[in-house]
Every structure is written in structure tokens, then in C-alpha cells.
Image: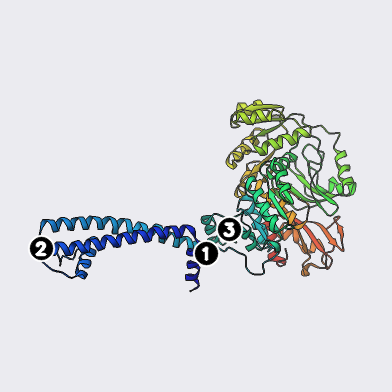
């Protein structure tokens, strides 16, 4: 009865269905009139021509059997006029009963019925008493990455989808989805937006503005994070009411630009924890190459802590006898003064003065070129699009139109002398190919690349890329940081900062006894106790009761931690 009631409600409220119903009823009336006329003509011809008197019921019976092509043959005409009449009835029956009627039934009844079932299958509102949930306005690449992280943290979320086919597909894939129009206040009211934790507006720039204005009318204080494609739309979306507008493609270009090696070795801040900075320090072309962590003595000299070593996307635990290579990037933590002291150490060493080579000048590539230009770093660009090449001349030292797979063009652009290469095409396959090709041409080159699909991360690292970052990872990390009220920390593809209460079974144990690094691969970077943060950790550091432990690692490492020590993060 509940299903019947929902269908009836849908039919009564659907304007298209009411219009279709009128068409179907009119056709059925026309069909009834035709059957009635044929029944009367049957009676007249039988009496006047054949000389046989049949009942009116018999006339209706004969008309229906002939029009439906059943043709039992128990009642027939003997005259030519009667047989011609039979042919007319038969042909009109084929058209009206066997062709038009099924089509009309499917078009005006069956299809609306299926649409009604689908619309009722996909939820339109969140469960009763749902609160502190995150709403997303599209299931794009950022949303896919973000929802995986929200699942890990057990944060409820819902995708609002205005396309029924996509909503139904997501629902069948067990994705929490709500069906509704994105510019309709009722959609967000049913999503209990007033009790939501955050709304992510991640459609196109034009629709984003409309959605933000719609939300602000019913929820003036709910935090809104918008994803902007064009830099020009950032101000528009902020003025419309968004609390945070993230130009992720520009950020991606800037993040990639920060990872190139083109000047003196320098610590690059990538995040913040409390009042301490987390930074990366490439050791290429520094006296640290071939030294062990103990021999480098950064803690003794500058007071900073080395919390991890990153080599081609792999986090390695810090061991005193670990030897550094030209590919090693130290992840360090310290205050501004300590990082400045380290930077001064490397000012006297020679650098490669040649331009950085940039391949691919779309939005991400141009943002990277502009960032490098502002920092006084020369850039040579290769791109096959003449329009992009023309736009890039403002930021680039030289521009080389053509295909990056051309060896002569690569050589002319400076692949053999460049200190770094930045791959920013939006084709993963091309970036993987170029990473492998450029690595063969220049073994000491630092290769920085963007990526789209997470499954290609390991492949491009094996191909030779030193640092990889995707649009989806950067966007999801930014949204997650905002939801937690933390600073954005970008350590690389899949590598994030975790904070959790110390598990009971580890309380009172030293870091060495805990086996966190050996068992999970996570790097412990700090211990927070009573608002005091300790980063100068050693194997003998005790894990106190009631404190928090801060770690670096990827999702797999986090899974291992949960399996071994309990689901606490």
C-alpha cells in the first residue's frame, strides 16, 4: 500500500504524466468509437447483404477477434463487400491495436511508472536526526578522493545529484546520494543543511554561484567551501557567500612549482602543526648526499627533527644509519628560525643556473610557470597548442611549440642541462612516458609531475618521477583541512598527517618498544600533551597516558595501525 500511495502521489503531482494521461485517454476513446462503428457496420452488412441476423454482442466479439488478428473463423462473410470490410477492420486493427496502442501504453504509462520507481528508490532526504554531516554537490574526482578519507574518519556525508540516472547508479553502488535539484531550497532543507558540518560546492563556476546564493538564503551560517575552476570566479563566489573558495588548479601548479630544484637547497614549508612548520629539504647538490642521518647532525646543529625521508613517493623511516642519496627529500619539523638557519647553510654551494623545463601549459602549467617566474626562476615551455604558447611568453624564458616526444625539440629546450622538469599535461599516459624518457636522457634530473588517476601513482614513480601530485588529492586535502580547522599540509600523493590519542596498549612504552614505524611504516613526528608539543623525539621517548600522537603516512599505513592497535584513527 505504501508503494501504491507513493506512485499515486507521483502521478498526481507530475505535470508531464497528467498531460500524457490525457493523450492516452483520448486515444482509448477514439479506439472505443472505432470498435463501436465496426460492430454496427458488421450488423448492417450481415443483415442487408448476408441475410443473417446476429446479436450486438456477436458484432462486438467479431470486431475484436478480427482487429486483434485472432480470427477464430467461426463467423465469416461470404460476400465481396463483407470480405472487403473484414480486410479494412483487420488492417486498422493491426495499426491501432498492435502498433499504436502498445507504443502509447509504454510511452504514456510504463515509462512514467519506471521513472516513478527510480525516483522513489533514490532517497530525497537524509535520515532523521542526521547532523554533523558533509554535503557535496557533485561526485567528481575531488569528491571521490574526499569520500574515501571521510569513510576512514567515520564522518557521514551525502552526494546531492540532480541527474536521476547518475543518482540511481550511485545509489546502486552504495554511495550515500540524495536526488534533488541543486538550485532548489527544498533539496537542501531535506538534506538537513542547518545541522550539517560543511557544504562542498563543486560543480562549474556558474552553477556554484547559484547554489551558494540558494544555500545562503536558508542557512546563513553554514560553512561553504567552493571549488573554482577559473581564478576570475573566486571573487564572485566569495561575494555570493562562500566562506572558502579553492582555485585548486592554480594551487596544483604552484605546489608542483615549489617542488622543483632550481636554486640553492632550501627548506620548503608544506604545512604547519601548532606553531611548528613542516618542511621538505631536498639533499640534491648538497654536502648531505652520501651521509647518514647521524652524520648530517641536523638536530644537533639546528634543533630541527627529521621525521621522514621521501624518495620517489615512498616514505622511509628515519634511522641514524640511513644513508641519503641525491633523490632523498628530508621531511623536517621546526620553527621559522631553525628552518632559516638550515637554508643559510647551503647558500655557498653551486647551483644549476639553467632554466626549468615545463611540458604542458594548460591552467596547471601556466600557474606553475607564473609561480616560478615570480620566484626568479627561468622556465622553458614545450606545448603543441599555439594559443597556450603565446599566453605563456609572459612568464617563460623560451617557448617551444611542438610535441614533447620529439627528441630534437627536447634537446633544444634544454632537457640535458635542466635542473628539473615539470610535467603538467592532463594525460597520465603521456606523463608516464615523458617521465621515463626524460629520466633516461638525464639521470640527475628532478622530475615533478601531476597525475589524474590514483592507480598510476606507483607506475609514474617507477618511471622516474621524484614528486607526484594530483588535482583530486590537493582538493580533498584542502577541504578536509578546512573541515578540521587545520592548516593545509601537502606531503605528496597519498601521504597525509594523522593525529590520534595514544592507544592504551602503547601508553608508558618508548617509541622503540611501540614498533609503530616497523609494524606500520608510519613516521611519528610529534607528541602533544596538555597543549605542549614535543617534536625532538628519539627511540627512548616515552608515550605518555592521555596524550596525542602525530604521524605521517598513507592510507595503507593507517589501516595497519588500526588493525594492530585498534580503530582509533
- Mark 3 = which residue? 180
Q: Is residue 493 visible?
A: no
Does residue 109 appear to the left or right of 255 in the view shown?
left
Instruction: State which quadrant residue 156 falls in.
Output: bottom right
Is residue 542 visible in the rendered structure shown here?
A: yes
Between the C-alphas of marks 3 and 1, the distance is 13 Å
State the residue position of label 1.
Answer: 121
Callout 3 crowding tier (Cα within 10 Å): few <14, some 14–19, many ≥20: many
Q: Nearer the viewer, mark 3 or mark 1?
A: 3
Rounded to the nearest whole Å, what is the CA distance between mark 2 and mark 1?
Answer: 59 Å
Q: Is residue 296 above or below residue 26?
A: above
> What residue is rendered at 79% in x and 58% in y?
550
Nearer mark to the viewer, of 3 and 2: 2
Does 39 appear above or below 317?
below
Disc number lying in front (2 or 1): 2
Colour setting = rainbow
Q: In what element is the residue under mark 2?
A: helix
Q: Where residue 458 sits: x, y (%)?
A: 63, 48
Which quarter shows the C terminus?
bottom right
Q: Earlier in the sequence, mark 3 or mark 1?
A: 1
SS type, badge 1: helix
> Is the Cβ of the residue at disc 2 closer than 8 Å to that at disc 1?
no
The residue carrying mark 2 is 50
- Mark 3 and mark 2: Cα distance apart in space: 65 Å
**Is 141 above or below relative to 257?**
below
Residue 48 position by quadrant? bottom left
Q: Is 161 displayed left or right of 493 in the figure?
A: left
Tell me which numbered mark, 2 or 1, is placed earlier along the sequence.
Answer: 2
Query: Which of pointers 3 and 2 lies earlier in the amino acid sequence?
Result: 2
Label total for image: 3
Amino acid at each position: 500500500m505504501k508503494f501504491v500511495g507513493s506512485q499515486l502521489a507521483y502521478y498526481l503531482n507530475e505535470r508531464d504524466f497528467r498531460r500524457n494521461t490525457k493523450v492516452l485517454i483520448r486515444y482509448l476513446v477514439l479506439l472505443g468509437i472505432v470498435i463501436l462503428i465496426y460492430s454496427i457496420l458488421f450488423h448492417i452488412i450481415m443483415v442487408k447483404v448476408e441475410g443473417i441476423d446476429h446479436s450486438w454482442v456477436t458484432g462486438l466479439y467479431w470486431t475484436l477477434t478480427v482487429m486483434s488478428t485472432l480470427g477464430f473463423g467461426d463467423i465469416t462473410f461470404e460476400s465481396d463487400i463483407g470480405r472487403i470490410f473484414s480486410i479494412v477492420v483487420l488492417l486498422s486493427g493491426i495499426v491501432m491495436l498492435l502498433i499504436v496502442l502498445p507504443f502509447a501504453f509504454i510511452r504514456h504509462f510504463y515509462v512514467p511508472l519506471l521513472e516513478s520507481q527510480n525516483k522513489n528508490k533514490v532517497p530525497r532526504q537524509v535520515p532523521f536526526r542526521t547532523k554533523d554531516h558533509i554535503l557535496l554537490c557533485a561526485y567528481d574526482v575531488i569528491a571521490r578522493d574526499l569520500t574515501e578519507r571521510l569513510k576512514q574518519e567515520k564522518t557521514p556525508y551525502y552526494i546531492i545529484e540532480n541527474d536521476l540516472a547518475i543518482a540511481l547508479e550511485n545509489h546502486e553502488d552504495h554511495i550515500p546520494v540524495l536526488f534533488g535539484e541543486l538550485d532548489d531550497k527544498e533539496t537542501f532543507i531535506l538534506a538537513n543543511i542547518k545541522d550539517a558540518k560543511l557544504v562542498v560546492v563543486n560543480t562549474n563556476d556558474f552553477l556554484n554561484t547559484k547554489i551558494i546564493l540558494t544555500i545562503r538564503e536558508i542557512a546563513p551560517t553554514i560553512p561553504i567551501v567552493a571549488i573554482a575552476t577559473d581564478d576570475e570566479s573566486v571573487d564572485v563566489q566569495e561575494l555570493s557567500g562562500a566562506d572558502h573558495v579553492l582555485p585548486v588548479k592554480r594551487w596544483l601548479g604552484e605546489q608542483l612549482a615549489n617542488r622543483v630544484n632550481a636554486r640553492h637547497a632550501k627548506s620548503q614549508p608544506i604545512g604547519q602543526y601548532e606553531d611548528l612548520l613542516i618542511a621538505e629539504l631536498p639533499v640534491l647538490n648538497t654536502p648531505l648526499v652520501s651521509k647518514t642521518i647521524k652524520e648530517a647532525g641536523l638536530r644537533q646543529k639546528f634543533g630541527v627533527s627529521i621525521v621522514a625521508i621521501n624518495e620517489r613517493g615512498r616514505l622511509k623511516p628515519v634511522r641514524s644509519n640511513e644513508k641519503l642519496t641525491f633523490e632523498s627529500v628530508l621531511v623536517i619539523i621546526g620553527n621559522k628560525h631553525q628552518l632559516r638557519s638550515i637554508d643559510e647553510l647551503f647558500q655557498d654551494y653551486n647551483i644549476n643556473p639553467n632554466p626549468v623545463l615545463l611540458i604542458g601549459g594548460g591552467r596547471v602549467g601556466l600557474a606553475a610557470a607564473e609561480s616560478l617566474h615570480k620566484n626568479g626562476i627561468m622556465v622553458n615551455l614545450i606545448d603543441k597548442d599555439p594559443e597556450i604558447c603565446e599566453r605563456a611568453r609572459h612568464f617563460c624564458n623560451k617557448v617551444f611549440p611542438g610535441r614533447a616526444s620529439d627528441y630534437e625539440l627536447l634537446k633544444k629546450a634544454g632537457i640535458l642541462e635542466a635542473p628539473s622538469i615539470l610535467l603538467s599535461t592532463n594525460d597520465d599516459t603521456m606523463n608516464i612516458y615523458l617521465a621515463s624518457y626524460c629520466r633516461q636522457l638525464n639521470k640527475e634530473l628532478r622530475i615533478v609531475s601531476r597525475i589524474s588517476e590514483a592507480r598510476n601513482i606507483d607506475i609514474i614513480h617507477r618511471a622516474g618521477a621524484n614528486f607526484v601530485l594530483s588535482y583530486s588529492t590537493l582538493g580533498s586535502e584542502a577541504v578536509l583541512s578546512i573541515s578540521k580547522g587545520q592548516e593545509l599540509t601537502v606531503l605528496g600523493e597519498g601521504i597525509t598527517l594523522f593525529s590520534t590519542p595514544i592507544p592504551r596498549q602503547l601508553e608508558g612504552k618508548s617509541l622503540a618498544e611501540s614498533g609503530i614505524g616497523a609494524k606500520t611504516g608510519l613516521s611519528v613526528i610529534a607528541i602533544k600533551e596538555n597543549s605542549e608539543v614535543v617534536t625532538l623525539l628519539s627511540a627512548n621517548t616515552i608515550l605518555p597516558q592521555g596524550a596525542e600522537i602525530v604521524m605521517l603516512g598513507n592510507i595503507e599505513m593507517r589501516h595497519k595501525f588500526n588493525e594492530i592497535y585498534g580503530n582509533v584513527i
